[in-house]
Structures are given as C-alpha cells and as structure tokens.
Image (spheres, rainbow, N blue to C red):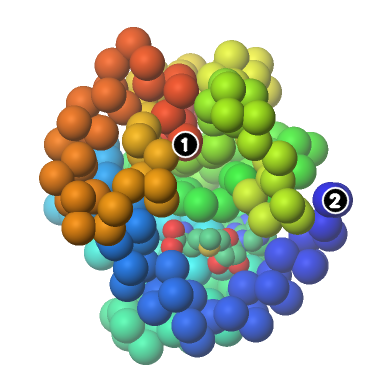
Amino acid sequence: MKQSPDQVISYYDSIATNYDESRFSNTYGAYVHQQEIGLLDKYVGKENAAHHVDLGCGTGRFLAYADTGVDPSQEMLKIAKAKHPDKILLCAKGNHTTLAQESYDKIYSLHVMMHLHQEEMLPILIEAHRLLKNKGLFLFDFPSKKRRNLIRYRPVNWHGATSYNLSEIKKISQEYFDVVESCGIIFFPIHRIPKQLRKYLLFLDGWLCRSWLKSYSSYIFVVLRKK
Ligand SMILES: C[S@@+](CC[C@H](N)C(=O)[O-])C[C@H]1O[C@@H](n2cnc3c(N)ncnc32)[C@H](O)[C@@H]1O
C-alpha cells in the first residue's frame, strides 16, 4: 500500500490530460466540486488572490482563488498553464517550494494530503508556516478516519489511502498552527444515490457537514492559523 512520493507524481503525470474530464464532468464530481467551491468562497475568496497559494494545484481547478500554484507534476501544470496563462506556476513539492517566506495570507491544498504518508505531512506544515504571514491561514482537506472506520472502508491501493481524525491533525500541527475551524465535505454516500437525485441533496449535505455529525463526513476541511 505504501507508495513513494515519485509514484504519486508519475501517476498524476500519466492521467493529467483527462483528469478534469474523468473526475469532475460526472454528477459525483460536480457534487464534490460544488461543495469545495462553497468552502473556498467562504474561507479563501478571490479578492486577495495575489496573496494566496494553491498547494498541489494540479490542473488549476481552484486557481481562480490564488495567483500562485505549486505542483510537482509537470503534466498537471501544463494543463493549469493552458487554463490560467496569467498565474505563477511552480513545479515543486509542497514541502520545498522556494517561494518567499512570510509573503502569503492564505495557502490552500485540496485532494493532496490524502496521497501523502503521515511523515510527509509535517514538512508541508512547516513549509506553509514559513510562507505565511503572521496569523496567515493554511486550509486543506483529508479523508475522515471516523467515517472510514464506520463504513469499514479498506483502500484498494495507495490512492487516497491516508486518513486522519481531527485530533490527529491538531496534534501533528500544534507546534506551528491552531485549528480554528473545521467542517465536512460529502456526508451522504452520494455514489449510491441515483444520479438525477444528487443535486437535490447538496443543500442538506452541506448542512450536515457543518453539524455535530461533521466528523462522519467523507472528508474533513480544516482551517489552521499560523502561531
Ligand atoms: C487529486 S490531485 C488534486 C489537484 C487539485 N488540488 C484539485 O483539487 O483538483 C493531487 C495533486 O497533488 C499533487 N501532489 C502530489 N504530491 C505532492 C506533494 N508532495 N506536494 C504537493 N502536491 C503534490 C499531484 O501532482 C496532483 O496534482
């Protein structure tokens, strides 16, 4: 199950040309995308994009919220560049970006932590801490371990195999960040619900993802503030 960081990058190089189409043009992908856009609108915003970084920006799905994108996959970045020729795009891993220190207000990273080993998380937190201005925010998502235990989820391969509880994220990040907010992403087992009904559940799903049940959502989205 353990993959090397280079395996993850080669995988994304190999699927880059159809990543957007295969992941987000179906009703499941659209459902996830809608929820994530809602979170970025609420917690990141587009107004101050010059001071934001999209870490693991991939094909640039969320680059409207940042002027700078970082990703180690050249092929994912090529697609991002074609879509966003005006953005600064850097080919690098999240733990070593070479961007200027204390220069950003917000850094966000979606669908990235789920691919990293636990020991790769801390170096990324340290790098985000270095890049952020005082009290800057680092926002990211990760698969919920509580949900996975509840449904007895067993990863079929390395893809998205890492999951956490919020308490673990607090512990790993405590030297550098305070966790100031959290909520869920995708509460309903949406892949089991008929396609034509999915969009009607979005509102209720979002509500449950903010309720006391949020830790049982598929993913947890956290907002960390630099100490
Ligand atoms: C599932 S894609 C997500 C892309 C984009 N954030 C999105 O949500 O559409 C995961 C991305 O993480 C990138 N990645 C892999 N290892 C990384 C690392 N160590 N640091 C930063 N990004 C990494 C991959 O190259 C890939 O583009």
Front residue (pair 96, 217): 217
Q: Which mark is residue 154?
A: none
- Ligand 1 image position (quadrant): bottom right
Residue located 54% across and 38% down the image = 142
Question: Around disc 2, counting alpha carbons within 10 Å, would you say few (fewer than 14), some (14 to 19), or many (20 or more)?
Answer: few
- Vertical placement of 56 versus 161: above or below? below
Q: Which residue is mark 1?
A: 219
Q: Disc 1 residue type?
A: Tyr
Residue situated furthest top in the rendering: 212
Q: Nearer the viewer, residue 179 or 155?
A: 155
Against 113, residue 24 (above or below) is below
State left or right for residue 147 relative to residue 208.
right
Determine which quarter of the picture holds residue 97: bottom right
Q: Would you say the residues marked 1 and 2 are in contact, meaning their CB atoms lie under 8 Å apart?
A: no
Q: Residue at x 78, y 60 (%)?
A: 5
What's the distance in space between the residues labelled 1 and 2, CA to CA? 21 Å
Is any part of residue 209 visible from this angle? yes
**204 or 226, nearer to the observer:** 204
Viewer-proximal residue, 89 or 14? 14
Image spot of residue 195 (x, y percent): 27, 58
Circle 2: residue type: Lys
Residue 53, by quadrant, is bottom left
The answer to whether one can see residue 116 in this image is no
Q: Secondary structure at mark 2?
A: loop
Q: Quadrant of residue 185?
A: top left
Viewed as shown, does residue 44 lie left or right of 131?
Answer: left
- Say which residue label 2 marks: 2
Which residue is painted at 76% across and 43% down in the image? 117
Ligand 1 contact, mark 2 (Cβ < 8 Å): no
Where is residue 7 drawn, in percent x and y? 78, 68
